[in-house]
Image (cartoon, rainbow, N blue to C red):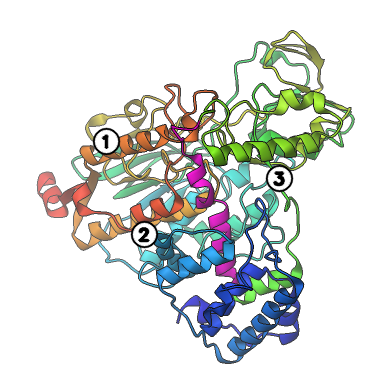
Amino acid sequence: MSDIEKIAERLDLTRLEEAVESANIPTLLMVLVQLTADLKWLEAPYRPLRPRGLDDNDDARLPPEIQREIRDAACAALTRWSETGEVALASPAPELLARMLSVSMGEDVPEAYGENIAAGLGIGPQARRFAPLPQRAGFRALIVGAGVSGICAAIRLQKAGIPFQIFEKNDAFGGTWYENRYPGCGVDTPNHIYSFSFAPHDWAQYFALRDELYAYFRGVAERFNLADHTTFEATVEEARWLEESREWQVRIRHADGRITEERAAIVISGVGVLNTPLVPPIEGLESFSGQSFHTAHWPQNLDLTGKKVAVVGNGATAMQIVPAIADATAHLTVFARSKQWAAPFPQFRRAVPDPVRWLLANVPLYQKWYRQRLAWTFNDRIHPSLQKDPDWPHPERALNATNDHHRRMFTDYVKAELGPRQDLLEKVLPDFPPFGKRMLLDNGWYRTVARPDVTLVDQRLTKIEGDTLTASDGSRHQADVLILATGFKAAEILGSLPVIGRGGASLREVWKGDDAQAYLGTVVAGFPNFFTLLGPNVGLGHGGSIISSIENQMDYVMSVLEMMLRENLAAVEVKSPVYEDYARRVDEAHSRMVWTHPGMENWYRNSRGRVVAITPWRNDDFWRMTRRARPEDFELTPAATAQAACA
């Protein structure tokens, strides 16, 4: 029985009726199709119109009488399902699933996408299923980091029956969501997809803030008893491959100063890419007379009331902080040397209505289809519009006609948000194509910088003397508190984890500091039995949930481990030609996309101009690439050979 056919208990019909009244019509239609097998719900007059922007399109833009018919039919169908557990169309063919999502979204979804939808719904041969793997004495894994990646890796290993131990430098689970605690901190991805597919949650908001996110990930770790396998306040100082024994030796420094060593067959890095703060070189920074800090080190109980505060940066972090603190400060100065595109954010801090929360928690089919719609909206939907059109006559302002339409739409939005402060338009409107940097979601940034008690400085902060901050244009500004919202060293992937591979090669040197490459972002030639989650070219520049990418990577890792255990292999190492060809394909794909546009800088590119942090692939592409490892891509060392070499 699949998840969509499971019923914990007969539904409360009064609550069901109330929930259906508040439900998302395009999602209800998909539920109706599966519960009844009646394809009339995919035709006019029931077909939803295309949503505007990133809106959920709850009413499908349909006439009230059609909405009424859909809600009544859905309530009746769900009542029958509650009583019988029967799903008339439990496993639609992939072609039909693609058609269903197309109808739900009001736009074309490629037919090939249907297999991905089936996996997301938990049906068909591609559905993600956890099963024990063959066991081998002494075969264990070490995981570095107890953030989102480490938690995911640990649960997958646990389900497979593979012994593991996590080493985490902090004193708790959570990673990014443990470390970042600044005002306004939250996700710019809907949390119904910014969550593990195997651990749905009763979210209070559509876009959760930090505390709810941290509680979710900590709760998942607790649910799976991961603390029993975790050593906290333990920093991995080095991971070294031992050729003779075909295993990793990991050196750990503990909170009390002790140094211990562990050995394991495999190492999985879950350190992520946004964990090393970037502090720009600013003359006199250390002599600032007030309180200064990077956003990743936000002081507890900081009170900004009545203070003059300066914020350096205007990326995603600054865009969250500035509106969140403006009401408290006496004056706020924002140093924003570069510009960002930001999209309307209609669901900012919008609570999920209680009836909808009940529906998501009690009707798995509704929850899974709602998640599928979000995955399409925030990821693969816009991918075609990010490709350069060589015949487009205005490459200086846009990539193609669709991208130019986005430019006009976002420009109109910015003008409207600035209101009477159109004098700021030149300071905030980017001169590069939309999506050239990660598209931000506006949570009141433009309205905030237009306030009379906020000064926007579109220059670099170059010098600090006491409480005086001097910009590159010579303007001087006073501050009691200086906040560095300057991001992280995203191009220096695994910069905080020294890894020594075959022949004594240092991964940091192989990657030349910031020129990281990995096959599928996961394995590196010369580093056997080593896997990196959120490695090079895995991040998402065009939106979507990075957790989906992590789960895809773990699908791939688990298939490698299955191969090792079933074939009794001591070591697996991706072949250099495979590794190098993949890097070439990534670079070629990026060369045709917005992030290599010459008119801008972004944190996706390294010092050489190469895109290293994010993927050029659609989510569907990466999902297909990571289904199963191909033995022919690896150098395989049988355990017997390794044992003979050590004898």
Q: Nearer the viewer, residue 464 or 421?
A: 421
- Callouts 1 and 3 close, C-beta under 8 Å: no
| Residue type marked 3 | Pro
Which segment did they paint magenta?
365-392
Residue topped by disc 3:
344
Q: Secondary structure at mark 1?
A: helix
| Residue type marked 2 | Pro
The residue sitting at 66% across, 50% down in the picture is 53
For the N terminus, the image quarter is bottom left
Label located before the other in sequence (1 or 3): 3
Is disc 1 surrounded by few (<14), some (14 to 19) or many (20+) residues within 10 Å?
some
Magenta stretch: helix, strand or loop mostly: helix
Q: Nearer the viewer, residue 4 or 98?
A: 98
In the image, which is nearer the foreground, mark 1 or mark 2?
1
Q: Nearer the viewer, residue 399 or 581?
A: 399
Q: Is residue 407 visible?
A: yes
Is disc 2 surrounded by few (<14), some (14 to 19) or many (20+) residues within 10 Å?
some
Q: Is residue 365 visible?
A: no
Q: Quadrant of residue 350?
A: bottom right
Label located before the other in sequence (1 or 2): 2
In the rendered image, residue 250, in percent from the top left (x then y), is placed at 36, 41
Task: Tell me the number on the disc at residue 580.
Answer: 1
Alpha carbon separation for disc pair 3 and 2: 46 Å
Label located before the other in sequence (3 or 2): 2
Alpha carbon separation for disc pair 1 and 2: 32 Å
